[in-house]
Amino acid sequence: MASRFSGALQLTDLDDFITPSQECIKPVKIERTKTKTGAKIKIGEDGYFDVSNGKEQKLQKVEITLADCLACSGCITSAESVLVTKQSQEELLRVFSERKYTDNNGVTNDVRLIVISLSPQPTLSLAARYKLTPKEATDKLAGYFKSLGADLVLDMTIAEDFSLLEAQQEFLQRFQNQLHDPKSKNLPMLASSCPGWVCYAEKTHGNFILPYISSTKSPQQIMGSLVKQYLSKCREQNPSEIYHVTFMPCYDKKLEASREDFYSEILQCHDVDCVITSIELEQMLENNNKSLRDVPGMELDWPWEALGEGSPLVRRHVGSGSGGYADQVFLYAAEQLFGEGNAQLTYKNLRNPDFREVVLQKDGQDVLRFAIVNGFRNIQNLVQKLKRGKSPYHYVEVMACPSGCLNGGAQIRPVAGESGRELAVQLELMYSELPLAMPGDNKLVRKLYGEWLDGRDSDKAAAMLHTSYHSVEKSDIALNIKW
């Protein structure tokens, strides 16, 4: 089994998300013959041959889409230089170019509104790369996307707050369900905001692990619902005419955006049409001999006027640079379940700094035990504990990348003379200095629960803010892949 791919597609070991080495294959099903032996494959110097019938028949290389990536357990992260048709900077630039052409010539275009949503991690990556403050980087990114033809450039605080609030409520429900049915698979609740981890779980551990994974959508996909389902109505726009782009720290976010679960047959569109990463944006600038420092800045847009005034600004949350899921859920659960309104968040490193835990004690007993698990080596240890029934945790924030999302697989690499660890520390410091967002205090989110979602416990809220995951059956025959 082999593939043709960029030299960057290598995976040296399970802790090394940034520099992948194992060749990537896509298992595909070959229809079996009536014999019980199945297909026989011969590996030749110039390809693969089916020799089941006594003759060598060269197998055709398979074109795969973005959704096919991570289809095998051998490749558990997306690759750095995978070029896919619908999720590339080339496609984004093509959309911008066509939009400008049609606007200038009075021709009707399929895309009538281009919306860019910025997440904090890649914004900080660009800030570090170009020696800017986070606010300067945010303004210049808004200016750059507007110069290309974007209509709106938004921050994702509302979507991030929704995701955290729903995760809090989901944990309380799971905790209470576990009390009533100790043999159920309600706990530990495993965070679902990292698509690399989710893809790995679906394709490697299937139905065993999926019941533990949170159903709460990631901020990216909640933002997609906000743009396509709410903003479109506010602006009297057909959702399929909105081209929604998210700016993310990770190639796996492309995989997430392309999931069939996030495509609406009724609206005939995805929630997120294109994902652009830190590295890709840097390449876009360099291809035009530009520096982000030289781009005129512009303020972020605020399209939520119907909900009230606000200050659009990339923000942080209490906790890790991956969004603070463990911290937010821990503090909320401590207060709601045990009346501890001032619980202390004191983490203890276990195997390494990427596997750490925090415990709440009451009357000398451990009543809550949470963990943060980053990197696939630690993830495998966690999964093995679950399979042996030895996991002590109630909740785990799981991220595929060592050090989490600030060190995402598509974040800009360290410059000469700078180590990856030094850059990660720098980004953590920058994240800690961002304005703090408190999800429970977000008045706009509260209004959206009522005016958009028909209440927090409605069917519509469940549809817009939650999803499901699926075990992926692996075939036992693989064909050659052309990237």
Image: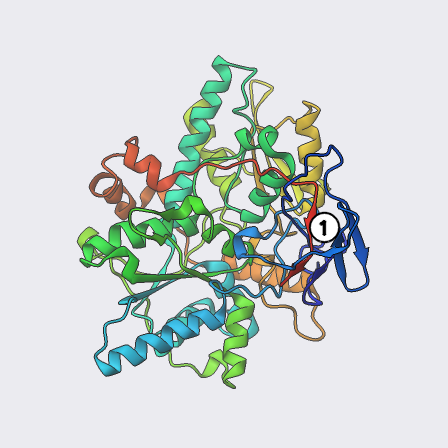
Q: Residue drawn at (18%, 57%), measured in percent from left and top?
A: 236
Q: Is residue 457 left or right of residue 189?
A: left
Q: Secondary structure at mark 1?
A: loop
Query: Of 416 and 249, which appears nearest the observer?
Result: 249
Q: Position of residue 205 (x, y in %)?
A: 64, 35
Above or below residue 250? Residue 468 is above
Query: Of 107 and 415, which appears nearest the observer?
Result: 107
Identify the residue at the far bottom of this view.
289
> Disc 1 residue type?
Asp
Q: Is residue 105 left or right of residue 468?
A: left
Q: Residue drawn at (53%, 74%), measured in percent from left and top?
A: 282
Q: Residue drawn at (48%, 63%), measured in percent from left and top?
A: 87
Q: Can I make out residue 152 in this image?
A: yes
Identify the residue at the far top of this view.
180
Q: Can I make out residue 22 in this image?
A: no
- Report which residue position mark 1 lands on: 15
Above or below residue 413? Residue 325 is above
Quarter holding residue 139: bottom left
Q: Position of residue 233 (x, y in %)?
A: 20, 53
Quarter holding residue 300: bottom left
Image quarter of the C terminus: bottom right
Above or below residue 320? Residue 107 is below
Q: Is residue 85 left or right of residue 435?
A: right
Task: Give the tally of numbered discs.
Answer: 1
Q: Residue drawn at (47%, 29%), measured in percent from left and top?
A: 334
State the scheme by which the image is colored: rainbow
Q: Position of residue 24 (x, y in %)?
A: 69, 55
Quarter holding residue 387: top right
Query: Of 175 and 84, which appears nearest the observer?
Result: 84
Query: Of 82 and 224, which appears nearest the observer?
Result: 82
